[in-house]
Image: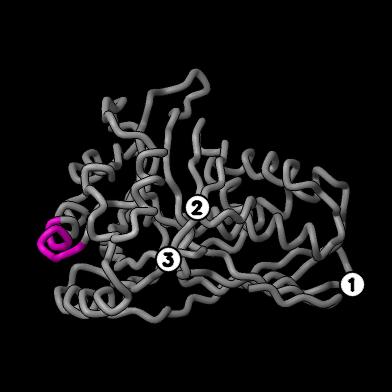
Amino acid sequence: MHCFDSEFLITNAPAKLNLFLKVLGKREDGFHEIETVMQMIDLHDTLKFQKRDDSQVTLNVREVQPLFAGTQRIREEIPRDENNLVIKAVNLLREETGCQLGVDITLIKRIPSQAGLGGGSSDAASTINGLNRFWNLELSLADRCRLAGRLGSDIPFFVAESPLGICTGRGEAIQPKASRKLHFVLVKPHSGLSTAAVYSNCASSTFSQSAKDVVKGLHIANIASVKSSLFYNSLEEPARRLNLDVQQTLKQLEQQPFVNTMMSGSGTACFGLCRSRRQSFHLARKLGGMDIGSVFVAQSRV
């Protein structure tokens, strides 16, 4: 969703799920070489950019509760300064282009933090794309993706705005793929996890399936017949060891009639793939009564 005139711009920043994530090894630059399938979903943050007559940049953050079934989620303290990826994106754009225009930014936060859902990365990507348009910077997609990669490994995926993609390298190399309508139930446990801690406890994977196998499997007409053996996340095992909430959440999900269950990214959010929208609401209501965290119903963006 985009709303734009000369005085303001409003845009949505979608969350993502990793439907597959294989760690291939550690690189010389300290990052991990990965192969992953990322799917944008309709859970989203919203950013509003308001024109200023000076060069000041401000960020106001409002947390709102998205539509979901389950317990109230714990409020996280979200930085309003240079520790927020939105401000980092603004500063990088101004440094790269020499633009010194100011802007008032309001971030309406729905995507939980420390969840593996890419909320902060998506906010940064929407800032890069939004201000490129709002400030008439005329940066190409390649230039915007290059800048995004300097801020974070999965930010280029959101900048590219392809709903489904195979991402390789450290996550910044994107192969857009055709998406289809899929239905999910997400559970974000009460606690979070450090991405760095999860990666430091993972090993290189020997899993035989590839991201291409998963993308091909997703387009089987009957989603219920997709082989659960296709889905894999190298980071799930270390996350289970580091955080008992992840272990408990996945255990509860695995007892439900999902097509498949897994953790997204480095966690702690876990999800189940459903056969239909109707089933997603039914299972969300059921999980919502278990007090295992915040429960969300979501569907893929296509």
**Helix, strand or loop status at disc 3:** loop
The amino acid beneath tag 1 is: Asp
Residue 80, image x and y in percent?
Answer: 59, 63
Residue at 18% across, 42% down: 241
In the rendered view, does 288 fall on the left or right side of 57? left
- Span shown in magenta: 251-258
Quarter placement of the N terminus: bottom right
Q: Nearer the viewer, mark 2 or mark 3?
A: 3
- Which residue has dot 2 on it? 164
Q: Residue pushed farthest top?
A: 28
Q: Residue 53's mark?
A: 1
The amino acid beneath tag 2 is: Leu
Observer able to see residue 71:
no
Circles 1 and 2 in contact, beta carbons < 8 Å:
no
Q: Camera-side residue: 262 or 49?
A: 262
- Which residue has dot 3 on it? 181
Q: Residue 13's mark?
A: none
Mark 1 neighbour density, 10 Å: few (under 14) some (14–19) many (20 or more): few
Q: CA distance from mark 1 to mark 2?
A: 39 Å
Q: Residue pushed farthest front?
A: 221
Residue 20, image x and y in percent?
Answer: 35, 44
